[in-house]
Image: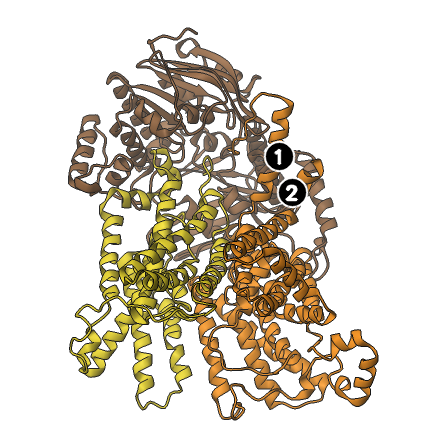
Chain colours: A brown, B orange, C yellow
Amino acid sequence: MEVSSEYAVQMHGIAKRFGAFTALDCVDLDVRKQSVHAILGENGAGKTTLMNILYGLYQSDEGEIYLNGQKASITSPTEAIRHGIGMVHQHFMLIENFTVTENIILGDEVCGAAGILDMNRARQKVMELVERYGFDVDPDAKIEDISVGMQQRVEILKALFRGAEILILDEPTAVLTPQEIDKLLEIMQDLIAGGKTIIIITHKLKEIMRSADECSIIRRGKYMGTVNVAESSEGDLAARMVGRNVNLKVDKTPAHPGDVVLSVKNLTVADERGIEQVRGLNLDVRSGEIVGIAGIDGNGQQELVDAITNLVRTKSGKIRVGSQEVQNTSPRNVLDHAVATIPSDRHRWGLVLPMMVAENTVLERHNEDLFGKGIMLDYDKLHSYTSELIKRYDIRPAGCEQERMSGLSGGNQQKAIIAREVSYVPDVLIAFQPTRGLDVGAIEFVHKTLIAERDRGAAILLVSYELDEVMDVSDTIAVIYHGQIVGTFAQGTVDEEQLGLLMAGGGSQ
Amino acid sequence: MNAIVKFLKRPIASALVAILCGFAVAAVILAVAGYNPFITFGTLIHGSIGTPKYITNVIIKATPILLTGVAVAFAFQTGLFNIGAEGQYILGTICATIVGVTVDLPGPLEVPLVVLAGALGGALLGAFIGFLKAKFGIHEVITSIMCNWIMMYLCNFVVGTDAFHKPNSNTAFPIHTSGYTMILPEWKVSEEGIEYLIAHPLLRDVLLKTDLNLGFLVAVLVAVLVGILLSRTKLGYELRAVGLNKDAARFSGIGVEKSIVTCMCISGAICGLAGALNITGIAPHTISLLKVQEGYGFNGLSVAFIAGCSAIGCIPSSLLFSALIYGGMTVQQVLGVPSEIISIMIGTIVFFTALPSIAPKISAWIERRRSEKESSTPNSTAKEA
Amino acid sequence: MNNVILLIGITLMYSTPLVFGALGGVVSERSGVTNIGIEGMMVVGALAAAAGSYFTGSPWMGFLIAGICGALVALLHAVASISFAADQTVSGVAINLLAPGLALFACRSFFDGGATSPIVTKLPKIFGDTWMQGTPWANLNVNVTTVIALVLTAVVWFVLYKTKWGLRVRAVGEHPAAADTLGISVSKTRYACVLCSGMLAGFGGASVTIAIISQFTQTAICGQGFIALAAVIFGKWKPFGAYGACMLFGATQALTIILGGGSFPIPSTILSMLPYVMTIIVLILFVGKSVAPKADGVPYIKGSR
């Protein structure tokens, strides 16, 4: 495409390699001024890498960047900021124990003489911005005390404070409720009306259809073309993203629930600061059914799962597995009651990355006689056992049992965790954010495995921040808000709007 | 060239590169200070492995630091930094001395008793430090350092008590001779023994002029056992998992707090054993007043880090370390070079082992240069995302 | 009354080197670099101060040189832990081996093979040398370094909390990636802080050899750097918190000395343990939840989260 000042951003022939891995291979991007341009691609397709190049965090190996028709070289975030580019990262770049104002001015401080901070003037400038864009943000609040939606607005303010004309939003809706998403889309329209240009990175088709004017598609580092969103459809975009026709719906047969296997009664759990995050929560999960917990991050999901797995102590209430109470015992005890868990953060809770794959697949079972008699651990048995799992679950690369876990891709790491947990033949399977950061193929695998486990007779508790996932996979949907279940529905009896309202604390059943 | 690249990618290369750097830095400092580095290094090597007696003494002096090194390496692999090896060593010597002085049994009973007392003392102190970390979350480095000082004063206290103080000296009473672990201690000073040794000069050098004792064998055995414990047992697997990812270990049902205490207990026991073996093995077979900490624990840190925290690797590493220190004394006596040059060397070696990326970086550099020669296209070496 | 004055005097004297060391620790760790090498930097500072005072004849020059030399040693730690992403604990341990070796080697080279320096000119006391001589009040005539330590504590506090540089340092220590995306150089900030930390530790060494005693000896610095580290943690990584922790430690030292001089039936060896035992007890009682800077001890590698 020709270089022209009609375009706010033009990136031509961008290539980026990390060692032997080609992250981007000759990618083009042309973003019209005052438009919302979406970049669509699977996890790991290279969307974020492309934007990190535009923001100066990485340097491209080949290709050129033009801003408003002028060739630009962007070698650092400072350069990008100077060119009027602002970026809101998927994982917010906010300092938790700083105030909103401190976060906004960081690096571009409002100072009196000799570098002494002038916090009054800084606060004033932040307030001006807040008022101009109608954001609902308290400049003196600490980041750790405000909601995720508000944190996102702080991130946008950070960019606007630096005079950004081009805003990059990386997966901006991942952690928001449907209502918050509406609010964000409104803000985006206001910004466009105010003369800004917005690039959003996403793998969610629905939001692209709603918000974007144009959409560029990247698949495995390759440019797949740009489409006019108004002339396209979800199915079309999905096919271009994945490279084949995908089934957007999850296939499953109706559930045949049995007895209650996991039962939570009046559970109250406080976090480490002593604030109650779960407040008298009640929940039953039957064998042969998937109960999905819908809710926004930070409404007690983490504490609920931690209490069931006994990582934290409860304040009051009972957790029963079968007929036995398991609260305030030990993680070991819960495992011994055949409760398996796929943790939300696989790097933190699920895997010991520097250890071998084989050592990871027996992480909860190494004490069984199967893996060595007495005090000794029999590595030969470990390897043969793991190589079996690798084959059965198609973990790649094949024969990786003696490789370090850190060398596997995210999807294969998740497969290894699922292989381990399912090999337990659990009565209860807790899946917490089981598809986080996975591509479409891996997501399909995870969902199929969950449904297969359900059909085997396990009781499945699915906790996810992705509302679509909960709605598609669960037989029963429970909404968590403020540490309580505020509504329970059979699948198909509730729509997104209703759930969103409950998730945000509005209305009651 | 290929062989070099291949070699540089092996973990041992980092240690060897670091040792070379140590010698290089020492050479520069020596030259600046007006000493001939080559003569100094020659003397150093001669002073450490020049005669059978020297070699024997190097081995004897390697014993305690091999053990403290293994203790530190073991703790490090399980995610703990046992800077308290010094205090645990001292408590080992104290306990061994107290038991060795007060209990008098025949050798086969006395020796294990004294050695066990030392190991137990170290184990208790280690477990205490581990307990404070597990229960109250107090960083082990702080409590360890405090305990090092407390143990030093405890040692001085014990030396000063009426029950143990040897009159007109800076030491406590030596332990009963039945607790000694030297090789043939009585025979070698008997008439018959001396006669035999005069006829066999090599043995005379090794035996008569030194405190050659069983300690080193015990230490090597411990190093091997710890190596097996870490790499081949369920306990070792659990401890390593805790060290590498505490959260994942807890999640999978491993008692993290229990592991921390267990690990510090074992590490402390090894340090205490080091102390006890020094009491049973070498003169004066007792504790003395300490003005400063003796450095067995701190030297253990260096031994462990040079060995890349491999228990088995501590064996060559402790011998190297011991040779440097022992040879350093000769250097000072013969050439008048301050023996601190040895501390500088060891410090430099440890410093370079802290840079794990240095050997891989060199090999990457060689490979890059070669590929640049082969094709003139620029090669990207960006960091991994 | 006399004992109280004595207690205050000795407390201030003992705590001064610790305050310098602890401030160094605060500055370095606030930027995200653990610094176990404070002890070694103090030893180098101690020698540099004595040698500087001896050769220039000015104790103030000695003080300055001590700061510079401390910073030079810190540069090693900075290169390892920032540029090479080394294990900061191992690097710190290496500094503690290397630095005392260097100091003693230099001492022997400067002063004809002696492990101690000659007696050198000391820094002045705050009220001059003869104020209230012979009365208990003379104990309150503290070294000028005691005042410098207090002033520097205030300066570090002010810079950390009231200036843009402090904001940046704290940001880098908490969330380096966030700072990086705003165009703040993580490595430059950390280099500056580690060098500053070495300078402060160097001052700490100087405050022993050219203020409390008047020469460098092998045992002038023995463990103060480590106690200063404990003070950093106990003081929750805050300048005045660390200052208070150092005072507490100094006070127990002073108590030990005063009790040792009295007619108490406690052996001096047991009394000597007191400060260390106290520290452990205080930590058990008060340490609570860890509040270390989030990125403390974690090397920052661009592009990783």
Whether B273 is drawn above or below B3: the answer is below
Q: How many marks?
A: 2
The three-letter code of the residue at mark 1 reads Ile
The three-letter code of the residue at mark 2 reads Leu
Q: Is residue A466 left or right of residue A500?
A: right
Label 2, residues with CA under 10 Å away: few <14, some 14-19, many ≥20: many
Residue depicted at 25% across the width and 36% down the height: A105
What label does residue A437 carry, if any?
none
The foreground one among C111 and A444 is C111
Q: Nearer the viewer, mark 1 or mark 2?
A: 1
The foreground one among A485 and B281 is B281
Instruction: Tell me where residue C235 appears, x and y as whole percent.
Output: 32, 61
For residue A450, what is the image quadrant?
Answer: top right
Whether B250 is drawn above or below A343: the answer is below
For residue C172, what is the image quadrant?
Answer: top left
Residue depicted at 53% across the width and 76% down the height: B91
Residue on which disc 1 sits? B366
Residue on which disc 2 sits? B8
The foreground one among B225 and B371 is B371
* Label 2: which secondary element: helix
